[in-house]
Image (tube, rainbow, N blue to C red):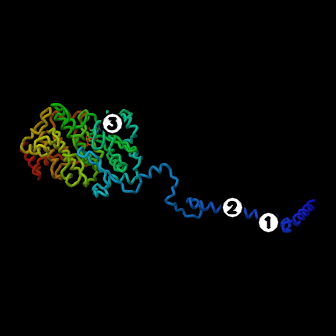
């Protein structure tokens, strides 16, 4: 049966067809063959077109092709990378330079490369930050303080409302506020809202944010959001020294002799910490009465140092722009732009004179010869009229010896020769001389609430009382100081 079927199937396949008289199996073979050929053709066509498309899209998975992404090609990136990329722009970053004080009252930007400003401080203040690449919002990981959100600060200040404005300075408006946890703060809304200034701003804040000292206003954190740049400080609740010295205080001022001495000493301690307790040291650049805040125990706290300059030890900072407040700026800094801590010491000397006399550093309403506080005071001291320089609003009479001493310290601080000005640690020893404060003053220093305790020098602060005593009697080459010293010796 099987043999019969096979032989009949063969006979069928061998039959001739009407197609060119070809046998059936030949026709079937040709048909199948052409189907296979057509199929192969389409398969190869598909493969070729696929390979072409993979080459144009730069797909690294395409075998045998070296991957060279075209510049226009935009690889798929995560949101995270998109946020970081703008901060790594290779273009030179313009740096911020801030004119401090009421004379200018503005924030000035300059491209340091084009201004030719030489920077004796080197990039120390920026180095650590830049090298770590932490220039974006990750500033909250700095390890100090807090990065506040705009919403938090708006809530704290009742939407930055006018009733909460404490005052307005050269940098921006200061608001009082209360954080959610009840902490009282002062929020400074900086005028500086240009994105390019961001790096410098953060670096300064990073460096100063770590500073802790009872005579320095503490920077709690800041807010960087959109165009907003805000600094958040501890709130100091008793106004500033400028208001207490020159404001509407009536015939008699609340600032007694001992309170004034306490303010001078506390301010000196705050500055000594900036100059001698930190590395790199910090030069405040704007020491003046409106930057000395007072708490309810009359303890002074130096403010506005968050935008000061950081300088490596024994180095100076050369700037083409002199910043500071008229009347307080050291002459050599004004003339040459050379900045170091001795500029602060000059300003501190002016501050002492202001505290003792109740006069502003420059007062055009006064008769000629009295307009410039330093010149007038030198003349008065030289003429043995020290008692006459005392603020008429002072409620008590200063001990004569203490008055002479403090005036001498002030005169030494404003020595025209910056190298002859004492260091801040040295000033503290002069101020803490036993006879400078009266009995009441010594009692005041013992009170725990008072900051007028003995200065505990920070590392590196020179401590040499004997040397101080010698210094107090030393004559200076400057005519004015020589005159003042002669006066001091004559009155011993
Ligand atoms: N932490 C703070 N606590 C309480 N008041 C503050 C605080 N910081 C600043 N102020 C007050 O806010 C006001 C503005 O201060 P700011 O330092 O901005 O300006 P300024 O020192 O008066 O002037 P400039 O900035 O031109 O030197 C001042 O009256 C100052 O006493």
For mark 3, what is the residue?
185
Marks 1 and 3: which is nearer the front? Answer: 1
> Would you call the spot at circle 1 few (<14 residues within 10 Å), some (14-19), or many (20 or more)?
few
Q: Is residue 226 left or right of residue 43?
A: left
Residue drawn at x 47%, y 49% as measured from the top left: 80
- Quarter of the image for residue 232 reads top left
Answer with the quadrant where ligand 1 appears in the image: top left
Q: Is residue 427 left or right of residue 4?
A: left
Q: Is residue 434 visible?
A: no
> Would you call the spot at circle 2 few (<14 residues within 10 Å), some (14-19), or many (20 or more)?
few
Counting residues from the start of the chain, the first of labels 2 and 1 encountered is: 1
Between residue 450 and residue 356, name the one nearer to us: 356
Quadrant where the image shows the N terminus: bottom right
Q: Is residue 355 visible?
A: yes
For mark 2, what is the residue?
43
The local secondary structure at tag 2 comes to helix
- Quarter of the image for residue 401 reads top left
Q: Position of residue 90 (x, y in %)?
A: 40, 57
Counting residues from the start of the chain, the first of labels 1 and 3 encountered is: 1
For mark 1, what is the residue?
30
Q: Position of residue 263 (x, y in %)?
A: 21, 38
Counting residues from the start of the chain, the first of labels 3 and 2 encountered is: 2
Residue drawn at x 41%, y 46% as measured from the top left: 137
């Amino acid at each position: 049966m099987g043999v019969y079927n096979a032989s009949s199937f063969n006979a069928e396949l061998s039959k001739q067809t009407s197609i060119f008289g070809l046998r059936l199996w030949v026709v079937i073979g040709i048909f199948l063959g052409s189907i296979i050929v057509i199929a192969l053709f389409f398969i190869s066509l598909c493969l070729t077109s696929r390979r072409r498309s993979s080459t144009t899209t730069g797909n690294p998975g395409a075998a045998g092709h070296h991957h060279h992404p075209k510049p226009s090609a935009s690889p798929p990136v995560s949101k995270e990378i998109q946020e970081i990329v703008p901060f790594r722009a290779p273009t030179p970053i313009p740096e911020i330079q801030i004119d401090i004080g009421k004379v200018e009252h503005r924030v000035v930007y300059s491209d340091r490369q084009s201004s030719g400003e030489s920077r004796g401080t080197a990039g120390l203040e920026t180095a650590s930050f830049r090298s770590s690449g932490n220039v974006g919002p990750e500033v909250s990981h700095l390890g100090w303080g807090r990065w506040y959100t705009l919403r938090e600060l708006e809530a704290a200040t009742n939407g930055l409302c006018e009733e909460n404005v404490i005052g307005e300075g050269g940098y921006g408006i200061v608001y009082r506020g209360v954080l959610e946890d009840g902490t009282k703060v002062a929020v400074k809304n900086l005028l500086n809202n240009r994105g390019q200034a961001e790096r410098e701003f953060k670096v300064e804040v990073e460096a100063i944010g770590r500073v802790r000292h009872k005579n320095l206003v503490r920077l709690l954190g800041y807010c960087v959001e959109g165009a907003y740049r805000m600094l958040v400080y501890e709130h100091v609740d008793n106004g500033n020294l400028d208001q207490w010295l020159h404001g509407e205080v009536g015939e008699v001022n609340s600032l007694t002799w001992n309170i004034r001495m306490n303010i001078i000493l506390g301010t000196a301690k705050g500055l000594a910490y900036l100059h001698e307790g930190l590395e790199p040291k910090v030069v405040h650049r704007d020491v003046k009465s409106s930057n000395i805040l007072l708490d309810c125990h009359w303890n002074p706290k130096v403010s506005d140092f968050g935008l000061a300059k950081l300088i490596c030890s024994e180095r100076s900072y050369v700037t083409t722009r002199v910043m500071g407040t008229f009347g307080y700026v050291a002459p050599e800094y004004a003339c040459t732009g050379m900045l170091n801590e001795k500029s602060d010491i000059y300003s501190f000397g002016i501050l002492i004179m202001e505290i003792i006399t109740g006069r502003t550093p420059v007062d055009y309403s006064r008769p000629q010869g009295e307009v410039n506080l330093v010149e007038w005071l030198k003349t008065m001291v030289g003429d043995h009229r020290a008692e006459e320089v005392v603020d008429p609003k002072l409620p008590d009479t200063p001990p004569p010896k203490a008055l002479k001493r403090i005036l001498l310290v002030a005169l030494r601080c404003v020595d025209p020769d910056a190298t002859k000005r004492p260091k801040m640690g040295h000033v503290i020893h002069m101020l803490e001389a036993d006879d400078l404060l009266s009995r009441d003053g010594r009692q005041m220093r013992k009170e725990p609430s008072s900051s007028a305790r003995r200065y505990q020098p920070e590392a590196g602060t020179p401590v040499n009382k004997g040397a101080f005593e010698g210094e107090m009697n030393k004559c200076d080459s400057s005519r004015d100081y020589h005159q003042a010293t002669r006066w001091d010796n004559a009155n011993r």
